[in-house]
Image (cartoon, rainbow, N blue to C red):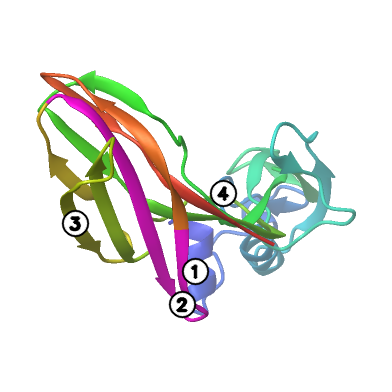
Amino acid sequence: MPLALAAVAGGALPATTAADSGQQGCVAPDVVGVTLAMARQALSASGCAVQVRQLPAHGQFVTPGSPDGRQLVATQTPSAGGHADGVTLSLKPLCAQPAQPGPDTQGPASSQGPTELVSGLFLSGGPVVTSPHCRHGMPSSGVLTVTTATGQPVARRAVRSGRFGVFPLKPGAYLLAGTISGPAGERQLAARPVKIVAHRTTRLNLVADVK
């Protein structure tokens, strides 16, 4: 934690001020990497005026219409320890994504490893929310079922929230189906075909869209 923020948390002001050092203005604390809300507290405690500028949006990241206390400080001018009447902060944009981000990849994807299937149950969609960092989707609880291509049962796994189901399988063609459990009840997901290859780990996630 930057020293200036530790001083704010402890209710103490920095011992060295512009008046003590004979310099004009304030001594800039280190606020890079913290939220704008925390940076304002540290700068106020140091007697520094605050100016902000927004960095441009990119990809999933959007620039709020006005500075948001959750935005992270990317750079500051002057840097920590510098003397100035005020400090200019450059703010990172916020990540905008659905309330349920879904999996990073749906698959199927194959990589060298044990001859097995790894699968998770995911919800994807919902209202867009913003946060300082983009979030990764977390698997939902429910039941995963593997059958042969003709529908004969092979294996069944109950999975908890945040967990994946792992199925050691013989090479061949299978169908993967699942049921997601949640406060609103159970939701059946359509079966998807998957091919298992010897000495390869196959990953396939089942995803249910939400509004």
Give the quarter of the figure containing the N terminus: bottom left
Q: Which label lies toward us, 3 or 1?
A: 3
Instruction: Tell me which label, 3 or 1, sits earlier in the chain.
Output: 1
Q: How many marks?
A: 4
Q: Quadrant of residue 58?
A: top right
Say left or right for 48 vs 172. Answer: right
Q: Distance between the Cα atoms at labels 4 and 1? A: 26 Å
Label 1 sits on what residue type? Ala
Q: Which label lies toward us, 3 or 4?
A: 3
Of helix, strand and loop, which one carries label 4? loop
Give the quarter of the figure containing the C terminus: bottom right
Q: Distance between the Cα atoms at labels 3 and 1? A: 55 Å
The magenta region covers: 171-188
Of helix, strand and loop, which one carries label 3? strand
107 relative to 191, above or below: above
The residue under label 3 is 156
* x 77%, y 52%: residue: 25
The residue under label 1 is 7
